Image (cartoon, grey):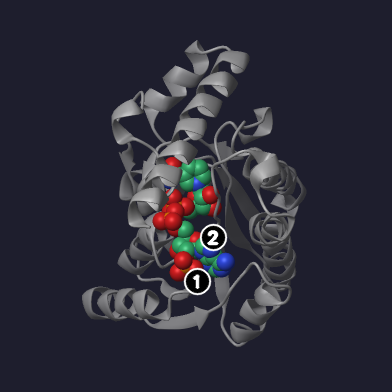
Amino acid sequence: MNGLSPYGPWAVITGASSGIGAAFAEQCAAGGVNVVLAARSTDRLAGLGRRLTDSHGVEHRLVTVDLTGAGGAADLLADTADLDVGLLVSNAGHGNPGRFLDQELTDLHRRLTLNTVSHLELAYGFGHRFVARGGGAMVLVAALGAAHGMPNMAHEGASKAYVHSLGVALHHELRGAGIKVTVMLPGNVDTPAIDRLGVDRASLPIRPLPAATAVRQTVRALRAGRSTVVPDRRLRALVRLTPGRVSVAMNGRMLGQAAANLARRKETVR
Ligand SMILES: NC(=O)c1ccc[n+]([C@@H]2O[C@H](COP(=O)([O-])OP(=O)(O)OC[C@H]3O[C@@H](n4cnc5c(N)ncnc54)[C@H](OP(=O)(O)O)[C@@H]3O)[C@@H](O)[C@H]2O)c1
């Protein structure tokens, strides 16, 4: 038993093949909750699923799904229709640092589907199922600072602001139906995304927080009935001390640098 056990026998986790999603899967399994692991990388999901079943004795189901495509979330709902799911962790997300006008419009549309529409459809679908079963819980993963705008990741920031707003509203709206909703606002969680985005770890104001710690803090916030959580006390202090326009400019500079690092990496590979 742990903080994720009370909601039901099964949890659905998107983006479970890596980082924050994998850490949620690990903590669900440690609490005896069976897990549906959803993402595109079947091999990584299969390895994680085997390990969780071996270590914790839980059942697992793999759902290989691309949530940038119309119908991805519907497929996930259909593939879990026979399970008594009590917890949704809607976490899958992706972004590319760089200038807005340098990006392909078709890519922006695909990432909009992943970063907003998939959360919308999963919150809607599982919301109905949770009402029918008399309760449940959702963690929607957005991003710290998104609501204020993120230069050099403008599109991702805007899409995460949607998830943030949706989750806070649902926190209040679904409470009466026995459904808990918490929005996780990560800012510096140590996952493969940091390096993939081209972020120079030495330039970060504080050392990234292990994903398992960030998830434990989020689980505590969910249990305590909080609408949002920013994992990492050091980051919360930094946010309190830094005026909004300063942090927007700082994040913009860091992401601009990340985009330049990625471009250099591509040149070296050529
Ligand atoms: N780490 C941070 O500090 C931080 C900061 C701000 C926001 N976030 C948000 O936190 C969430 C988790 O990120 P992370 O840091 O754990 O990154 P990560 O390690 O790269 O994990 C991202 C997960 O999303 C899945 N995913 C990506 N594109 C997908 C698609 N088209 N369809 C289905 N699944 C897809 C990936 O799996 P596959 O590649 O196998 O599909 C992976 O499991 C994301 O929404 C991210 O935006 C994280």
In the rendered view, tell whether residue 109 sits above or below residue 38: above
Q: In the rendered structure, which amino acid carries the disc numbered 1?
A: Ala
Q: Which residue is mark 1?
A: 39
Residue 171 x/y as whole percent: 68, 46
Side of 84 relative to 198 (left or right): right
Circle 2 — which element? loop
Q: Quadrant of residue 269?
A: bottom left
Q: Hey, which residue is sitting farthest front in the picture? A: 270
Of residue 81 and residue 267, the one placed in the foreground of this image is 267
At a point 56% along the width and 83% down the height, the residue shown is 83
- Three-letter code for the amino acid on which mark 2 is drawn: Ala
Tally of marks = 2
Give the mark nearer the N terminus: 1 vs 2.
Answer: 1
Residue 66 position within the rendered picture, expressed as x and y whole percent measured from the top left: 59, 73
Q: CA distance from mark 1 to mark 2?
A: 7 Å
Q: Is residue 239 visible?
A: yes
Find residue 200 and report its horizontal and vertical position in percent.
34, 35
In the picture of the structure, the residue carrying the numbered disc 2 is: 92
The answer to whether mark 1 is within 8 Å of ligand 1 is yes
Residue 90: image location, x then y, percent: 57, 60
**Residue visible at 72% across and 70% down?**
125
